[in-house]
Structure formats: structure tokens, C-alpha cells
Amino acid sequence: MNTPTVHAKRPPKARRRSPARPSRRRKAFRTNITAYGFLCAALFCFALFAWWPIIRQVVLSFQETNLIDEPKWVGLENFRAVVDDPAFGQAWKNTFVFTFLALLCGYVIPFAVAVVLNELRHARGYLRFVVYLPVMLPPIVSVLLFRWFYDPGPGLFNQVLDFVGLPGLSWLDSTDTALISLVIVSTWMNLGSGVLIYLAALQSIPGDLYEAAELDGAGIFKRIRNVTIPQTRLILLLMLMLQIVATMQVFIEPYMLTGGGPENATVTVAFLMYQYAFVYGGNYGAGSALGVMLMIVLLVVAAVQLRLTRDEKR
């Protein structure tokens, strides 16, 4: 009787172990290490030049110091001294009036110019350059240029008024025209950046919407009201917030053109902060306290605007 042969099973071959693969996180880190480097550099710059000064300002607002001797904590004394200053109310009034006038000019005019440039078919690039040119000039150059324009003698504006038979004005020396003169300077200096932002938003609107409006017989004003403004509403809200924040911090124009005069007609909150810190005997605590007040107001404005923007996105 033949016995069946039993074949011995061969032992399984040992699998070669592949080298350990790096984890996904490690691989992603190696891939994006350059981006992380740029991000860390940006965060360091923000912390050093933006966040730390804010923290330092809040601390200084509760101290009495000349930045040399040991600071002395005084609590809310700096805030009380600032509020009791007769120039406090005038500075806030001038700031709010300047912001309102600057929005009337600097918010509406750039949008209107952008709409006109968007409708043009020829020389569009050249006109964009002309509109953006004031932004490329240093602010101090623009301010000095307008100082000559406002000169009551040979100034350009009075020469134009004299040419058309109108009497000249004391642009910077009169309480009636000093603040609006600063608004004109600010509007001219910042016109180009606003126009370019609005142009970018206008060019993102689908052309089919304008064609449909034209087929329905809509003129240019109806197209702006029914197509342009609804399609750019989000950009309009964002620009409104940015311009309010920027205009409420106006400093260069009153500092270089009027020095806060005449009769404190152009003293703004930012200019009063400068006076506390560098004119009134180095009262850095009072200047910081006023800066904290301004920061709180701007935070409230930004919060309201962000809420409106969020509701608009929905």
C-alpha cells in the first residue's frame, strides 16, 4: 500500500521591510516649510510694529512717565485730564466733521471716476496712470504742493478765482474754509487707490448683466443703480469702513498746513495726541489715553461695518 507523499510547506519568504514613510504632517511641513518661513517673518513684523505698540500704548495710558525715569501708575488720571481739556471736545468735533466731509468727497468721487473710466474705450491706461499719480507722491510732497495752491497771494486757487472775476479766499487762515481745505488735500492724495479698487470690482461684473439692462432700455444711470451698485455692494461697504478708519486718524494735513489753527478749527484727535506727547512737555500718558479712546471708537466702527458685511454675504 503506497503511502501518500507529504510535501513539506515552504516557509513564507520574509517580506522586505520598506523604509519608514514620513507621516503626512511631516511631509506637509517639509513641502510648505518656505511658506511657514514667510508666515513667521510676517507675524514677527506685525507683532513688533503693530501689536506691541498697541499694547505699549494701553500700558502708557495708565502711567505717568517721560520714557526715561521709572513710570508711575496713576490709574484713570490721564483719561480724566484729557476729558477736562477744553480742546478735547473741539478735537472730536473736528475729527467727525472731517470724516463726514471726507466721505462725501473721498468716497463718492473715486467711485464716480471709476465708473467713468470703466465706460471709456480709449486712453483708459493713460487716464488710470494720471488718476493714480498722486498716490505715488510722498504725502509730504503733496501737502507742500497744496500749501502753494492755498497761498493767499500767488497761490494757484486764488489766481483761478481772480481769472474768473471772483475774490480770493484765505483758504487756511479762515475758520470757514480751513477744514474743507484739508478735505480737498486728503481727497486728492487718496483718489487713485480708491479708483483702482473700484475699477477691479467693476471689471468683475459679468457683461451679460449690462447687455440685458441695455436690451431693456436702461440708460447709464439706471444701469449704475440696478447693476453696478448691487454687484459692488460688498466692496462699497469694505471701502466705507477703511475710509472711516483712515480719515479719523488724519494728522499730516493739519500738522503741515494749519498747525491746528486757526482758533483750533483744524485740531483733530491724532493731532492733539501729538501735542500731548511732543509739545505739552512730553505728556505721553495723556497722549496714550487719547489714543486708546480713538482706538475704542474705531473698533466699534469696524465691528458695526463687519456685521453689515457679514449680513451682506448671507
Image (cartoon, rainbow, N blue to C red):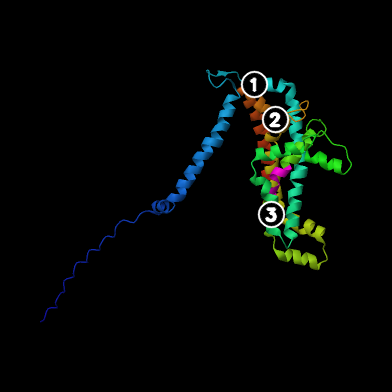
What amino acid is found at the position of numbered circle 3 in the picture? Arg
Image coordinates of residue 279 in percent, x first then y, are: 65, 23
Estimate the spatial distance between the alpha carbons at disc 3 and disc 1, rounded to whole Å: 48 Å
* Left or right: 139, with 224 as reference point: left
Q: Is residue 75 above or below residue 5?
A: above
Q: Mark 1 to mark 2: distance in Å?
A: 15 Å
From the image, tell me which residue sits under label 1.
78
Which of pointers 3 and 2 lies earlier in the amino acid sequence? 3
Q: Which quadrant would residue 221 be assigned to in this image?
A: bottom right
In-front residue for pair 225/203 = 203
CA separation, marks 3 and 2? 34 Å
Q: Earlier in the sequence, mark 1 or mark 2?
A: 1
What residue occupies the far right of the structure in this picture?
A: 165
Residue 191 included in the magenta stretch of the image? yes
Whether residue 314 appears in this view of the structure is no
> Mark 3 Cα within 10 Å, few/some/many (few <14, many 20+)?
some
- Of the 4 image quadrants, the one containing the N terminus is bottom left
Who is closer to the viewer here, 30 or 175?
175
Considering the whole magenta stretch, tell me its main secondary structure. helix
Q: Position of residue 109 (x, y in %)?
A: 76, 48
272 is within the stretch colored magenta: no
Residue 295 percent coordinates (x, y): 65, 33
Magenta range is: 187-194
**Residue identifier under label 3:** 128
Q: Amino acid at mark 2?
A: Val
The local secondary structure at tag 2 comes to helix
The image quadrant that residue 252 belongs to is: top right
* Residue identified by numbered label 2: 269
User: From the viewer's perspective, is residue 171 above or below residue 283?
Assistant: below
